[in-house]
Image (cartoon, rainbow, N blue to C red):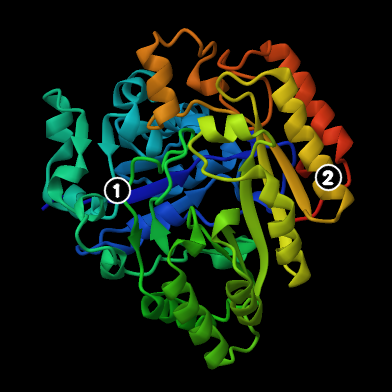
């Protein structure tokens, strides 16, 4: 069995967002889940560059710890940061073994090898990473040219299609430095029932956790005295399983936690009912994020969104009636979108602000992310509509593709104008740590 010392690194999101500071300090939950599944007690540390962004500090940390393996969590817009982590690690540690995992290596393993330049790419879920690292000579495999390791072949969540509550088999995350973060992150499901073409979860079967399992984790948060922090549920669509939601909220209310938890969820407008809102509010739900994406019905239909845009205001009014904040997210630059259709989105956002139906409004670029049906469609058409490299992908910033009917420079102008028109609510102008 190999003797290892591992450092897991979360690249910083600072370049991708217009505001800096604690507002974006969400726990690196993926790394915390890797760290807790450690059957051989391999020494492991997590280094979050969102919290400690200084490269000199990072190099000093590596010099002190002298890990034998560096694991980097790589999402597509963070390939630039991941490459620098690789370079800095080798500068300090020489022949350290670098492994890149996450969404981008899973869907673009060759690009990850070429651009990020790790020794090994890890595909699929990572909960068994430390076990495999201890039991398998991954270095030798990499030296022999086997530099793409597909963990899905070992089984795990990615293949548990028959057991919809397979996540109950996982341990709770290792919350390494919880006071560094504004939110406590909880993931109560993976995947999504819906098939929106821009989303990385479109091809993933949903795997849930039972209400009892989630409540046990919240009990643990109380024992760690962490319930004074807001809880952010990372589920793509939290209300997709109403029975589970009712059981969870009843369990939270019955426990009479002190302090009572406050939590924030993401869902779709067509999952909202007054009865569910009553239950959510009583249990401590203070905010709901809705991915509205467009104010134009044709565009919504083209996305596979399955939403009726005319019902959006009345649904959000129902949420606001219950005293729950709303974050409304839109995207600009959809496939085939015209400027007139972009203005439909801007006008809907203006309406939401005028009627106090959205506490925060965000406007994002449409990013053709690897692993999405949108990306595959563009590749099938030759891929020429993606003008910039993955290192230029940003939720805010210059448009990276020509998939709409609007010139990219004009799209950038429209996004700025959209933020200006809803300035009081616009995410681009908010200074608060809380969304």
User: Where's residue 172, x and y in %?
Assistant: 37, 69
Residue situated in front as seen by the camera: 170 or 372? 372
Quarter holding residue 42: bottom left
Query: Residue 61, how many percent across, how many down?
Result: 49, 47
Q: Secondary structure at mark 1?
A: loop
Q: Which residue occupies 12% across, 51% down?
A: 135
- Seen at 31% across and 64% down, the residue is 167
Picture layout, residue 37 above or below residue 150: below
Residue 103 placement (x, y as % from top left): 39, 38
| Position above or below: 206 against 14 | below
| Residue 378 falls in image quadrant | top left
- Please tell me how crowded label 1 is: few (under 14), some (14-19), or many (20+) other residues with Cα within 10 Å: many
In the rendered image, residue 435, in percent from the top left (x then y), is placed at 72, 55
Query: Nearer the viewer's eye, disc 1 or disc 2?
Result: 2
Give the camera-side residue of 271 and 173: 271
Give above or below for 186 relative to 25: below
Q: Secondary structure at mark 2?
A: helix
Observer-nearest of 173 and 290: 290
Give the residue pinned by disc 1: 125
First reached walking from the N terminus: tag 1 or tag 2: 1
Name the residue located 48 percent from the left edge and 57 percent from the top edge.
Answer: 235
Disc 2 marks which residue? 351
The residue at 42%/11% (across/down) is: 383
In the depicted view, which residue is nearer to us: 34 or 42?
A: 34
How many numbered marks, from 0 up?
2
Circles 1 and 2, Cβ within 8 Å, touching? The answer is no
């Amino acid at each position: 069995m190999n003797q290892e010392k591992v450092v897991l690194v979360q690249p910083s999101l600072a370049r991708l967002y217009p505001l800096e500071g604690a507002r974006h300090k969400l726990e690196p939950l993926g790394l915390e889940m890797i760290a807790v599944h450690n059957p051989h007690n391999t020494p492991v540390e997590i280094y979050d560059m969102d919290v400690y962004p200084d490269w000199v500090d990072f190099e000093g940390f590596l010099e002190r710890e002298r890990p034998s393996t560096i694991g980097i969590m790589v999402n597509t817009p963070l390939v630039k940061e991941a490459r620098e982590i690789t370079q800095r690690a080798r500068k300090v540690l020489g022949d350290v073994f670098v492994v890149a995992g996450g969404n981008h290596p899973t869907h673009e393993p060759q690009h990850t090898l070429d651009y990020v330049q790790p020794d090994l790419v890890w595909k699929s879920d990572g909960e068994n990473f430390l076990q495999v690292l201890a039991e398998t000579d991954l270095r030798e495999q990499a030296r022999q040219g086997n530099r793409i390791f597909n963990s899905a072949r070992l089984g795990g969540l990615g293949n548990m299609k028959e057991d919809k509550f397979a996540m109950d088999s996982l341990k709770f995350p290792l919350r390494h430095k919880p006071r560094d973060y504004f939110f406590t992150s909880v993931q109560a499901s993976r995947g999504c029932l819906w098939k929106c073409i821009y989303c990385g979860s479109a091809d993933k079967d949903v795997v849930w956790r039972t209400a009892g399992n989630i409540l046990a984790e919240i009990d643990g948060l109380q024992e760690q005295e962490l319930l004074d922090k807001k809880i952010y549920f990372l589920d793509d669509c939290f209300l997709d399983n109403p029975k589970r939601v009712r059981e969870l909220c009843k369990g939270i209310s019955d426990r009479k936690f002190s302090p009572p938890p406050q939590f924030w969820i993401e869902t779709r407008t067509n999952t909202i009912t007054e009865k569910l809102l009553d239950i959510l509010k009583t249990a401590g739900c203070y905010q709901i994020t809705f991915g509205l994406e467009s104010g134009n019905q044709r565009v919504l239909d083209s996305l596979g969104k399955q939403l009726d845009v005319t019902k959006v205001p009345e649904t959000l009014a129902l949420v606001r009636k219950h005293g729950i904040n709303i974050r409304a997210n839109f995207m600009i630059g959809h496939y085939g979108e015209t400027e007139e259709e972009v203005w439909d989105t801007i006008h809907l956002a203006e309406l939401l602000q005028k009627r106090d139906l959205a506490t925060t409004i965000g406007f994002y670029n449409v990013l053709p992310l690897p692993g999405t049906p949108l990306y595959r469609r563009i590749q099938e058409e030759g891929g020429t509509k993606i003008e910039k490299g993955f290192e230029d992908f940003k939720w805010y910033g210059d448009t990276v593709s020509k998939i709409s009917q609007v010139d990219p420079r004009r799209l950038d102008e429209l996004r700025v104008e959209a933020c200006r028109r809803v300035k009081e609510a616009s995410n681009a102008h908010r200074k608060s740590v809380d969304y």
